[in-house]
Amino acid sequence: MTRFFTVFVFVFLVSFSAQAQLLIVAIFGDQLNSGKIEFGLDGGYNRSWYLARDDAKGLNNFNLGFFFHVKMNENSTGFISTGVHVKSNVGASGMPTYAIGDPDFDDVYADGELITKVNVFYVPIMWQQRMGKIYVEAGIQPGLRAKAFDYFRIEGYGGDLEYKKDVRDDFTRLDFGMVGGLGYRLKSGSVSPSIGVNYYYGLVDVYKPDTYNLKNSSLYVYGRIPIGAGGSKEK
């Protein structure tokens, strides 16, 4: 089961970020995954929600990206852990809908559900401390907002209805917060696949209108797969 999951995640990650991988491999060459620089793909499940909004529920997402681990010195067990979440959503579900000024539309969706999905390119910058196969990491996570949509949904009328509205102008371009968690490396040595859990706590009000003070939060369950030109030099 573990091998199947690893192969499944790997195939999807490769399909979404192949160009970025080729560029990084071309730049760093044999330094990748040589024990000093560990590079690879990461992705998995994350559940996001808004802090301090009681009528909002969590939103299930999948995220894809790549990571860098840079060893600080030869004898250190500490690493700089960074990367980019190339495909990453935050937001919430289960919220009441709002009027958009069209009486017919507002009447249809008055008792519906509102779901907000915001696509953000997050760049975690953490210190990772390894203790055997177990590691902990913590740091900051700035983000750059790309797209944002509100989904109006309601059941009935002979089927489920959905309306998608572009709301990117309602959200700030930048997000910022703290991130940290723990993980487990599946193999001994300097280069290994790993699994882990991280939590992001947003510090910035990302919603421009005065109606709500929205701060993002997200729980990540991920897998990391090293790739690259080099290989571990440890026996």
Image (tube, rainbow, N blue to C red):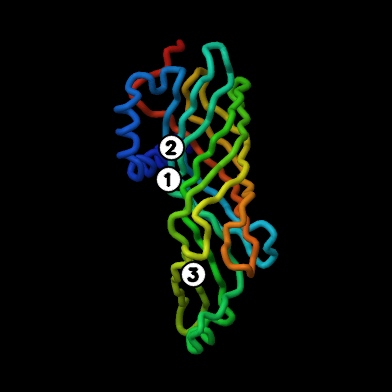
Q: Are marks 1 and 2 in contact (CB under 8 Å)?
A: yes
Vertical arrangement, residue 225 with respect to residue 76, above or below: below
45 lies above or below 94: above
In the displayed structure, does residue 202 sit left or right of residue 154? right
Res 8 → quadrant: top left
Residue at the image position 61 percent from the left and 25 percent from the top: 129
Circles 3 and 1 in contact, beta carbons < 8 Å? no
Q: Residue 214: where, in percent of width, then height?
A: 62, 60
Quadrant in the picture for residue 115 = bottom right
Number of other residues with Cα within 10 Å of mark 1, as a class: few under 14, some 14 to 19, many 20 or more: many
Q: How far from the left and from the top, in percent, is residue 202?
A: 62, 49
For residue 64, above or below residue 89: above
Return the residue at label 1. 86
Looking at the rendered structure, the secondary structure element under dot 3 is strand
> Pointer 2: residues within 10 angstroms few (<14), some, or many (20+)?
many
Where's residue 153, x and y in %?
A: 51, 74
- The one nearer the camera, 6 or 107, is 107
Quarter containing the C terminus = top left
Residue type at tag 2? Phe
Query: Residues under labels 1 and 2: Cα distance?
Result: 8 Å
What's the mark number on residue 151? 3
Q: Earlier in the sequence, mark 1 or mark 2?
A: 2
Residue type, label 1? Val
Q: CA distance from mark 2 to mark 3?
A: 29 Å
Residue denoted by label 2: 66
Picture residue at 66% right of the left edge, 56% below the top: 51
Other residues around mark 3 within 10 Å, as few (<14) / some (14–19) / many (≥20): some
